[in-house]
Image (cartoon, grey):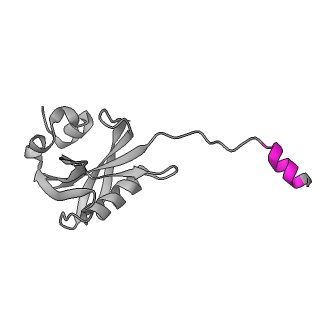
Amino acid sequence: MRLRFARLAQPPLDTTAQALRIAIAVVLRGAEVLLVQRRDGGDLHWQFPAGMVKPGADPAVVAVAETRAETGVHCAVREPLGSRVHPKTGVHASYLLCDHLMGEATNLDAAENAEAAFVPITSLTRFIQPDRIYRPVLDALGVSE
């Protein structure tokens, strides 16, 4: 009885809601960068591979795992590029520059993506409008607007 009372008398666990977080992998293979064509309702749009970061998870680990799960591409994080609240989705996005280790881009997540491909960095802004790309990503890739 005392134990039960002691538990009830303790302050409640922290139930503060956490903001949704995603990890975005910018995977380089020579002069190419990996993109996925995401299904968004009835629309399709190109973006970098990304995955949701659960509380306590490391964004770098999530970026590598999601890239492999979505595209079959194995990569390693070279360096973090920064983070921001994504202007379109409102989620906290962490951007990670990654190096391709092995694997060809294959769409392994047909429910979420229509395609996966390595595209020339020089053509990136034909796939994604430059004003929708986080500035440090453009800088890391040497892309000018």
Q: Is residue 29 left or right of residue 136?
A: left
Residue 83 in the image: state x and y as whole percent. Answer: 36, 38
State which quadrant residue 139 falls in. Answer: top left
> Does residue 30 show up?
no
Q: Residue at x 21, y 48 (%)?
A: 42
Please state which of residues 89 and 42 is positioned toward the viewer in this rendering.
42
Q: Quadrant of the C terminus?
A: top left
Q: Quadrant of the N terminus?
A: bottom right
Q: How many marks?
A: 0
Residue 8 in magenta stretch: yes
Q: Residue at x 20, y 38 (%)?
A: 138
Residue 29 in the image: state x and y as whole percent. Answer: 17, 57
Q: Is residue 110 left or right of residue 55?
A: left
Residue 33 in magenta stretch: no
| Residue reaching furthest to the front | 42
> Does residue 55 show up?
yes
Establish if 95 lies above or below 73: above
Q: Is residue 141 left or right of residue 85?
A: left
Residue 4 in the image: state x and y as whole percent. Answer: 85, 53
Q: Residue at x 31, y 64 (%)?
A: 69
State which quadrant residue 130 falls in. Answer: top left
Secondary structure mostly seen in magenta is: helix
Residue 79 in the image: state x and y as whole percent. Answer: 33, 47
- Boundaries of the magenta span: 3-10
Please state which of residues 31 and 10 is positioned toward the viewer in this rendering.
10
Establish if 71 lies above or below 22: below
